[in-house]
């Protein structure tokens, strides 16, 4: 069996694009386990300028018309024989719709992972445009798909409300084997970390600053480290909010960081905050938990049940400043003693080791592909 992941981009893990990061990790693990796997990327810059990897990557030129597929991509799809399955990534992407119709024409099976696009909150953004697009394009893609793979229950629920189906399958992504836990460092500070794109609405960053501001009133030595970048105007807006709240002295904007540089920063935070309104499955939560860092997450991250089951952090119901403040207070209190801190940190690592074991998850994907 041959597996081909089709994405927008190059599956470069050294980018803030979460889809590219998880596809890279998944293809790597599949290759190591002996699967015949490739990643095909549609990109405006088809140059192989990424770190060395375990699997073959093929890049195809994107066109000005988002619904168009290059002649080379259509030709290579058509030449695939029985025993090949395509795994498409991303929802509401015109290129994926066109690819799905070409796959259907050539009688090649495919599954689709929308990566959070069908979550109820996500469906509300640009609602009218999405309703039209769903009616004329996305519905046809979903009807042609063999399976619809979701990373969290919120996406399955959202999709069922607009496209009742029996194709949905919930399988989380895994994480590489857990390394040694980062030694506990009690510096007297309480560092709250955020790592990801500076998407103010989706990631709940305005509310994070407001909630941290309330928390900082009681914990004067608290700091908020923001790792990641986005639009210039979004960064400037966050800086202005921090200034208006008089917490600019307690916030550090690191910009984009990758690889070990990012890990070294994460290892210094006491709690990772992910107050998103919409997610597929944020890999940064798993990365932080693997280091022994408890996480404050919303239900919308699809990690809440895991966090609660393992007591690996705290779950808030919605993106709200007061809830964020309350969550930070409770976690800060729980980590006041070395015993309390090490217990919750050990729980976070155990969660990754047991619930996100790549061996178990790859086996579930293998059965999905075979079916």
Image: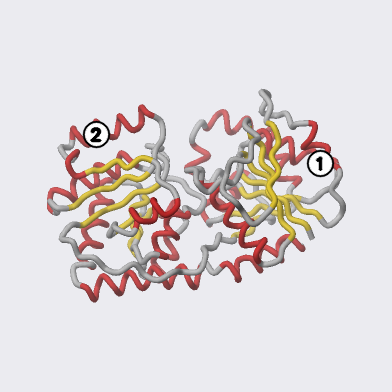
Q: Quadrant of residue 226?
A: top left
**Residue 335 on image: x %, y %:** 23, 67
Q: Do we see residue 87 in this rendering?
A: no
Q: Is residue 238 above or below residue 287?
A: above
**Residue 156 pos. (x, y %):** 57, 53
* Coloration mode: secondary structure
Instruction: Specify which label sits upstream in the sequence, 1 or 2.
Output: 1
210 displayed left or right of 81: left
Q: Secondary structure at mark 1?
A: helix
Let me know if residue 60 appears in the view.
yes
- The picture quadrant where one finds residue 205 is top left
Position in image of residue 175 (x %, y %): 51, 63
Residue ID for mark 1 = 76
Q: Which mark is residue 241?
A: 2
Residue 244's label in the rendered image is none
Identify the residue at image location x=44%, y=65%.
306
In-front residue for pair 140/29: 29
For disc 1, the neighbor class at 10 Å (few under 14, some 14 to 19, many from 20) is few
Disc 1 from disc 2: Cα separation: 50 Å
Residue name at image x 71 percent, y 52 percent: 38
Pick the residue in front: 76 or 314: 76
Left or right, 190 with respect to 129, comes to: left
Which quarter of the rendered picture does the N terminus lie within? bottom right
Residue 336 vertical placement versus 47 (above, below): below
């Amino acid at each position: 069996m041959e597996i081909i992941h089709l994405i927008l981009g190059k599956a470069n893990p050294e980018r803030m694009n979460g889809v590219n990061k998880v596809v890279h990790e998944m293809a790597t693990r599949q290759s190591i386990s002996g699967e015949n796997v490739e990643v095909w990327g549609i990109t405006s810059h088809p140059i192989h300028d990424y770190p060395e990897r375990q699997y073959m990557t093929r890049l195809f030129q994107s066109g000005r018309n988002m619904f168009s597929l290059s002649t080379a991509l259509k030709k290579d799809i058509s030449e695939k024989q029985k025993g090949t399955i395509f795994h498409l990534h991303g929802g509401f992407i015109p290129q994926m719709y066109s690819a799905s119709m070409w796959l259907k024409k050539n009688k090649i099976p495919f599954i689709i992972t929308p990566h959070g696009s069908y979550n109820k909150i996500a469906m509300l953004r640009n609602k009218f445009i999405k309703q039209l697009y769903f009616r004329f394009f996305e519905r046809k893609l979903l009807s042609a798909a063999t399976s619809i793979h979701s990373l969290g229950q919120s996406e399955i629920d959202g999709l069922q409300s607009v496209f009742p189906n029996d194709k949905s399958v919930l399988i989380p992504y895994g994480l590489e084997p857990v390394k040694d836990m980062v030694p506990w460092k009690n510096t007297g500070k309480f560092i709250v970390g955020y790592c990801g794109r500076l998407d103010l609405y989706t990631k709940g960053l305005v509310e994070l600053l407001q909630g941290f501001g309330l928390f900082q009133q009681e914990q004067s030595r608290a700091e908020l480290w923001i790792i990641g970048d986005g639009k210039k105007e979004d960064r400037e807006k966050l800086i202005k909010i921090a200034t208006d709240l008089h917490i600019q002295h307690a916030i550090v904007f690191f910009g984009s960081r990758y690889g070990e540089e990012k890990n070294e920063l994460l290892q210094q935070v006491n709690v990772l905050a992910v107050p998103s309104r919409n997610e597929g499955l944020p890999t940064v939560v798993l990365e932080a938990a693997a280091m022994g860092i408890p996480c404050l997450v919303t239900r919308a991250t699809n990690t809440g049940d895991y966090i609660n089951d393992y007591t690996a952090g705290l779950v808030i119901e919605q993106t709200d400043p007061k809830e964020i403040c309350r969550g930070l207070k409770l976690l800060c209190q729980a980590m006041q003693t070395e015993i309390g801190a090490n217990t919750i940190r050990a729980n976070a690592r155990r969660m990754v080791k047991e619930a996100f074991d790549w061996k178990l998850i790859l086996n579930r994907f293998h059965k999905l592909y075979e079916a």
